[in-house]
Amino acid sequence: MANSSIDPGMQLATFGSGCFWCTEAIFQNLDGVKKVESGYMGGHVKNPTYKEVCSGLTGHAEVIQVTYDPGEISYEELLEIFWKTHDPTTLNRQGADVGTQYRSAIFYHNDVQKTLAENYKSQLTGAQAFDQPIVTEITPASVFYKAEDYHQNYYNLNGNAPYCAYVIQPKVEKFRKVFKEKLKN
């Protein structure tokens, strides 16, 4: 399903940082985030399926599209969480997940987001925050295709599954410790 409208006063942020199950589980916890949807962006095939995206042939990245209230959480705060919860130095890879669909990407929705994302990346590069060069792409948002229903809210619905228990849960626990002041009550 392609882009849908959002409530007045809300804004969108779209990030690719590896497996969307992991990223969704983190951003759902943030105060000010109203909705997180897993999906696909940045490819050349209309209405791609998960199987097609996993083939690496559609050009899409697994992404999350975040609907947030900028009065409660800023885009800058979302960027901070994006940069600190994945490895932006590995090209087309996050952990054991390998392929262009797992690339590090920021899909900006307006010029302000573009400027903020580019400035943050420049600051990290200038500060040599990572041992390797940052490979995160910063590109305009294109059509968002919502992933199949079984991918939505995945961690919360499948927390006992091995991937959730061994990969997502430790990442979420670390995130909750580091960003406890930004969590929903």
Image: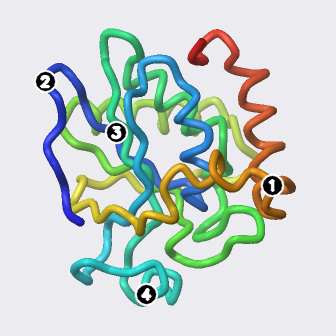
Element marked by disc 4: helix
Q: Amino acid at mark 3?
A: Ala
Q: Is residue 73 left or right of residue 179?
A: left
Q: Which residue is mark 3?
A: 13
Closer to the N terminus: mark 3 or mark 4?
A: 3
Q: Is residue 76 above or below residue 84?
A: above
Q: Amino acid at mark 4?
A: Glu
Q: Residue at x 44, y 48 (%)?
A: 15
Choose mark 3 or mark 1, whichever is in front: 1
**Closer to the camera in the image, 62 or 131:** 62
Where residue 160 is drawn, which disc sits there? 1
Element marked by disc 2: loop
x and y percentages locating residue 147 in the rendered image: 40, 66
User: Which of the 4 image quadrants contains residue 58?
Assistant: bottom left
Where residue 52 is drawn, which disc sits there? 4
x and y percentages locating residue 29 in the rendered image: 58, 28
Mark 1 to mark 4 CA distance (whole Å) = 27 Å
Choose mark 1 or mark 4, whichever is in front: 1
Q: Amino acid at mark 2?
A: Pro
User: Which of the 4 image quadrants contains residue 45?
Assistant: bottom left
Q: Quick one: label 2, few (<14), some, or many (20+) residues within 10 Å? A: few
Closer to the N terminus: mark 3 or mark 1?
A: 3
Q: Quadrant of the C terminus?
A: top right
Q: Quadrant of the N terminus?
A: bottom left
Q: Is residue 134 above or below residue 100?
A: above
